[in-house]
Amino acid sequence: MDSKIRIGFIGSGGNARHHMGQMLSIPEALVVAIADPNPAMIEAARRQHASLAHVPAFSDFREMLDAMAMDAVIISTPHTTHKEQILASLDAGLHVLCEKPLVCSVADAKEVIAKLEQSGKVGLLSYQRHYQPEFRYIRSRIASGDLGAVTFVNALQCQNWKNGTRGTWRQDPALSGGGQLNDSGSHLLDIILWVTGLGVETVSAFVDNLGTPVDINSALTIRFRG
């Protein structure tokens, strides 16, 4: 019996190709299929990872779910497509690793979480800071009480997100569901909540699109519970 975890990829863009490289380096993992509506992206994945040259590829992720024997999928696609892909993968009996953000609305998040809990499968968001030693150390010190009660948190993220995403789907609200804040900005929000263990009570926010269809600059004030 083959003990390898059989993985299918939904999406084969640059981020997905990074995940592919990581999976190919793990002896217990086996990439068995790729799904992407853009054949150029599939070819790029095969050029970057020669061992995937003969792995079955599909233009429709649902065809992959129907045709392939898999244990799990990795989803790395435009944000507004996540919900459909996650739900279909859970319906197929698969574990799911999804790139952030999970989905683009509170209602969709609740639906996905409920489905995941009913499925009994493992669901994971790709927030890698949870596994980085510096953040794990901070979390453990706060949880131990050594630092006392957390009463104030200040965090800043600076990047050239506007120019770096110009002309891509990340600046198309129909595909991205938002701008910098729910893209790379969500890493900052995630790690604040994770290391502190705090829950959110209220949020006030200001955003500036800087002439684009999505938010570029944002400032948030969060009141935590407790």
Image (tube, rainbow, N blue to C red):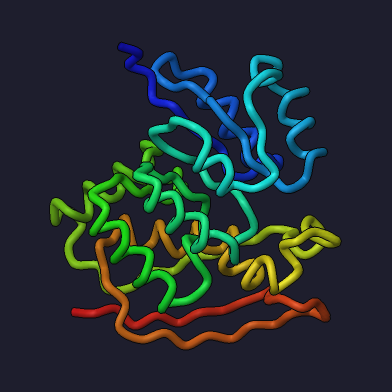
Specify the quadrant that holds the N terminus: top left
> How many marks do you count on the picture?
0
Q: Position of residue 93 (x, y in %)?
A: 34, 44
User: Which residue is most to the right?
Assistant: 167
Q: Position of residue 125 (x, y in %)?
A: 42, 51
Q: Residue at x 62, y 52 (%)?
A: 77
Q: Position of residue 226 (x, y in %)?
A: 18, 79
Left or right, 34 with respect to 192, comes to: right
Q: Residue at x 31, y 55 (%)?
A: 195
Q: Position of residue 75 (x, y in %)?
A: 53, 47
Locate residue 26: give its quadrant: top left
The answer to which of 185 and 45 lies nearer the viewer is: 45
The answer to which of 87 and 186 lies nearer the viewer is: 87
Left or right, 226 with respect to 221, comes to: left
User: Which residue is most to the left?
Assistant: 145
Locate residue 170: give its quadrant: bottom right
42 to 221, vertically: above or below: above
89 to 12, vertically: above or below: below
189 to 43, vertically: above or below: below
Q: Residue at x 53, y 59 (%)?
A: 82
Left or right, 21 with respect to 114, comes to: right
43 to 198, vertically: above or below: above
The answer to which of 113 and 143 lies nearer the viewer is: 113
